[in-house]
Amino acid sequence: MNTAPDSAVAAADPTQAHVAAEWEHDAPLINCRFDPTGRFVFATSEDRSILRFDVESGQKFVLETQETWVRPLVFDPTGETLVSGGYDGRLVWWSAAAETPGPLRSVDAHDGWIRAAAVHPSGAQIATAGNDRIVRLWNMADGALVGELAGHEKHVYSLLWHPEGQFLLSGDLAGVIRQWDVASRQEVRTLDASALHTYNGGQGVDYGGVRSMALSHDGGQLACSGLTAATNPLGAVNEPMLLVFDWQTGELKTTHETKDKLKGIAWRVVYHPSGFLIAISGGSGGGFVIFWRAGEAQEFFVHKLPNTAREMDLHPDGLRIVTAHHDGRLRISRLDGKPNEEEATS
Amino acid sequence: MKCNHACGSQEHGLARRSFLGTMLGAGASAGLGTLVRPAAAEELQRQQKRVLVCYLAGGVSQLETWDPKPRTDTGGPFRAIPTSVPGVHISELLPHTAQQMHRLMLVRGVNTNENDHGKGSYIMQTGRRREPSTDYPYMGSLAARLLAPEGAALPGYIHITPGGGGSISAGEAAFLGPRYAPVVLGNGNPPQNTALPDAVSVTSDAARQSLRRQQDERFLRRRRTALTEAYTSTYDQAAALMAQREVFDVSKESEQDHERYGTHDFGRHCLLARRLLENGVTFVKVSHSNYDTHNENFNFHIEQLGEFDRTFATLINDLADRGLLESTLVLVLSEFGRTPRINHLYGRDHWGTAWSIAMSGCGLQLGGTVGATNDNGTEVVDRQVDGGHLFHTYLRALGFDPTDQLTVDGRPVQIADPAAEAIEEVLA
Amino acid sequence: MAVHVRPVLLMLRRCIAVATVVVAVQFLAPAGAAERPERPPAESGSLADQIDGLIDEARELPVAAPADDAEFLRRLYLDLMGTIPPAEETRAFLDDPSTDKRTRLVDRLLASPQHARRMQVWLDVTLMERRGDTHVPSAEWQEYLRRAVLKNRPLDELVREILAADDTDPARRPASKFYLDRGGELNLLVRDVSRLFLGRDLQCAQCHDHPLVGDYEQQHYYGLLAYLSRSFVFSADNQPTVFAEKGVSDPVKFQSVFSPDDTYETLPRVLESEPPAEPQFPGGQEHVVAPADGVRPIPKYSRREQFARDLACADNRAFALNWANRLWALMMGRGLVDPVDFHHSDNPPSHPELLDLLADELVASGFDMRHLMRSIASSATYGRSSALPDGIDPKTLVPEQYASGPLKPLTPEQLCFSLLEATGIAAAHRAAVQQELTTGDPRLGELLAVDSARERLADEVAEQRVYSRLQGNLGAFISLFGAPGGSPQNNVQSTVHQALFLSNGGPLVGWLAPGSSQLVDRLAKLSDADAIAHELYLSALSRPPNDLERGQVAGFLAARAEELAKAVSELAWALCTSSEFRFNH
């Protein structure tokens, strides 16, 4: 495993964040994820391809092109298997770690877009959801459908397994988060993240949604990312926002926004092992990695990126962040000391 | 100095002498849009042709509707699906409409070369580029003038908009005059001022109207003119319109129909449009808002077309079932399409260079396409047309000669842009 | 005067009131002091006779009787003041036994501040055609026009100011509205200059000689355009947008689409007149301020100033004929040349000698609008009843014979203000303003009553205040009864929406609602039906009811005794929506 020791995690200092590497593709990127071992980073692109980059060498491998765009990328805990979800409603299993990765299986899983997928902590099941508003559960091993969770009234945007494996969370466009007891297929409770949604009557559009969810490492808090202040949805006038709930009580604890009212969507939020929150914001204001301390409404640091960003993942070592960009580049930003002054000022 | 053809008269190629010779008699009288051949208009009014326009405000994406380019750099994430016409594919966002394709004609080579909302909208509804010195009537006003039965109680041009109050958009009628301006039904509500105020009972209204008529009778005995006739008749028209107020009440339609059309505003408005057309309104425009998707084009097209698709397909199907489609020209328009290039916000921007519209009914050739764009939709490669060609085509479908002249303050104005002509191959 | 210690607040209030008056006096001093003496009325009297002579000589139809006093009063009020007369004014006029009362009425109305308002509206609507504001606020432009009329400034001078407007003098900023709020669009400006100031719509001559009108040639179009081809809309940061001008330009060239191989070139010229002699400067020395990025150029010689001089002058016959015809149309309902922007030899005036006479008189009087309007108003032709003699079918009427007084639909402004007058609302606001100006503050009242000049000022201040209280009612009437902004406002249709507005949803219903209506509540307090009928007809139709009408009112009210106010409201509505009200007759 490439996971760094605790000392390295402690060395992470967002205020030192800087772009350390850039890898190119010739079409805009959509998503990016490190595999659990941290050896590869996978990305998807508007040219319908799935890409794999070797984190050390930057070497690129293009997986078989799909029918449409691919959004979610998830892995079994070993990193050997990748499952991708497409806007054609199809799930595809891939030999992620092979020298030349290829498709292993595909399943027509949903009617319309698959927007989210999440693998059970045990690696045995995969949950998926999207525009048909139904959450489905699949056997990781053979792709068999093992369950359905119905109840969302709007497109489902995000999924998250609780680390203990009993509960699945699903968040939708309207800002409704449903907590499911998976064994009984029962809904346990809903959390109200509707602050992340807006209906603009003049334009006649719904906008926003729970774009991602993350649970703090101590299990005490649930963070959701998305947008607020959407005065002009069709014109991308909106600001990134996180809502943090107390996991036990379901109460809203903190609303995280930006000091300078940056323009964008918080596409994803993750918790750093040290406890702070990391979100990626992209939109009309540009691309930013934003860092908040738990409980503090405003960020303590913003790492400005050279191009608008659409997704982000944190390396298992806790020191590297990968971001996917419209300019076709993956950028690796480091959270530890900058190599020299020139780079710091460039 | 470049001439912008502000004159709008017959083709400029005509020698001035012959022009003077043919037009002098007809053009001498002044007036608001006098048609040079009134007999032809009477014949058309007799045939009861109608027009329905679904106006997708803000500019719907041709790539997510009528001209998908899947698996290309511009195609976006949606697939193309087969339709009821073999060989014709449209976006997967229109599954119900796809089943009505045999009743549609897609024009895929539209190039209006205009990326401004207001100017694009003007081109698509007047068939001309905006000129600083002359305003031309919108097709709804023209239809109200030329197609609507004389003396009809209901307005000839009705525009149903989402939200907002009702009003009269006098500007759209231009030189035809405000009588032919659209009556705007904000959120599908009945026209303004068509209900008696609370303080005035029916008997009270009858009393005051009777007093008014008596007063007029005395005054006009020695003073009657065309102007006074026009004025006094507006009260009769008002009474007739108020008596027909129920025509605007869509709740009179069956619950089943409400369900079929969709319980959203656009569904309700299209059901109202059907009701109005069935009750003899000549021109109905229903706006659906909004498609100006600079941001998250794909999400918003799922949402908007999700409303449009089933409702529109139901409406087309109903018009056909009820025998109205033969006499009703149906158009799906926007001010422009959207850029093939997908921007950094997953959006598409304004694009008048290579886009599509859909037409139906009124004896048009249906079940096909005319015109084409290249592989990734960045330019028209076959049968390029602009707003003028489309306007000529609509008029021809309705039975007009688009080269007929209207006389406006003594000045001849061809009904449709003299620089364009109809798309003959879609006319029966 | 005894000195008392006064509460500070009161002092302050007085200071403000006095200051207002002082400002008003200073502001208005030029208007009162420098008002141009009009041509002596005696001559205009003879002009009125000449008008009648020329009209009568061309007529074949029998003539309607002279209008009675009430009909004349209402007509003159609408034409000169833009509204129907107040009831008490009507009463006084009808009761006045003197024989010269019509002459005195014409004089009094022409001299009133309401007349300046009326002509301000007419000039504004004529010149701007209800375009939306872009660069110059309407309020400033309208005030500019109002003051010009108030001072009876020569019309040619006013037009020269408008056509030469270049914003170098901030005080004349409003004059640049004509150019700026047309966006400086050259073709639009040429069309509108030709229509509005020369009485000929040259639009069709842009691409070729006019296809229908032999007189309208393409070279006329480009001759006008050449005066403006150096002008452009100039914007710079933090400065108002102006219509600027360069000192040089390429020659103006044009081709006819009928013969695209030939290219013509023209210097600036007004129709058939000779091009002006233009000063020549060595290359590079044409400017006082040379054009540069972000710098507004100022030429040594302005073609636009030359344009104003060449176009709006006594020597330009088309200019004089245009305005003589438009003023005639304003008073008589149609131009001697009709339409008013279609002067050409195949569309001759109905009375060529008369138009010539009016144009000559306009020039000789120094483009004095008041003088011409007085003469027309004093003619027997103007003073004829609109009711045709018995036995004449109205359908056989030939309008250009002027056998009877014309029926003119009220403009949106006339309709709105007349309804406000008829329903008693205008009178209530006048009273409130009088209260403000006189009894509200005795010192102000004293100040305004010092001499006749101050009284005149008081009238003007009162008019402005009443207008500002009432003008908010105009919008709904303009949008429904006017033509769309930017198009000619003289061809307006009756629509069903207007009737619905007056019947159901518009303000009129509220203005006549029992319990809150000035008019209805006043009438409902009267004891007998006869008195109600009299007051009602006087207020709404500016005349007493005839016997038949009195009988009808009595019958109607007798049947509704238990809901008298409601019945009065219905009667009042019927009169306010009658054709007799809707038209100036």
Image (cartoon, rainbow, N blue to C red):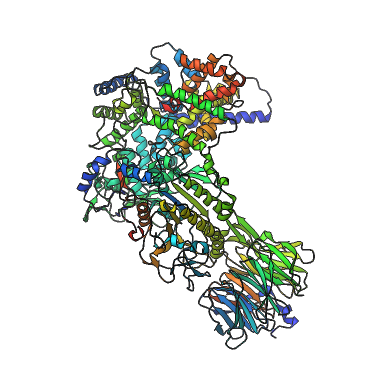
Which residue lies most toward the right here?
A248
Figure check: B221 above or below B43: above
x, y percent for residue C234: 41, 51
Front one among C359 and A128: A128
Front one among A146 and A257: A146
x, y percent for residue C388: 34, 21
Which residue lies most toward the top here?
C97
C215 vs A209, left or right, is: left
Which image quadrant is residue C34 in? top left
C501 vs A208, left or right, is: left
Q: Quadrant of the N terminus of chain C?
A: top right
Q: Is residue C167 visible?
A: no
User: Total marks drawn?
Assistant: 0
Front one among A228 and C265: A228
Figure check: B214 above or below C95: below
x, y percent for residue B189: 55, 44
Q: Quadrant of the C terminus of chain C?
A: top left
Residue at the (52%, 54%) spot, across then down: B288
x, y percent for residue A234: 55, 59
Figure check: B366 above or below B201: below
Which residue lies most toward the bottom here?
A99
Front one among B71 and C450: B71
Q: Is residue A66 visible?
A: yes
A231 vs C541, left or right, is: right
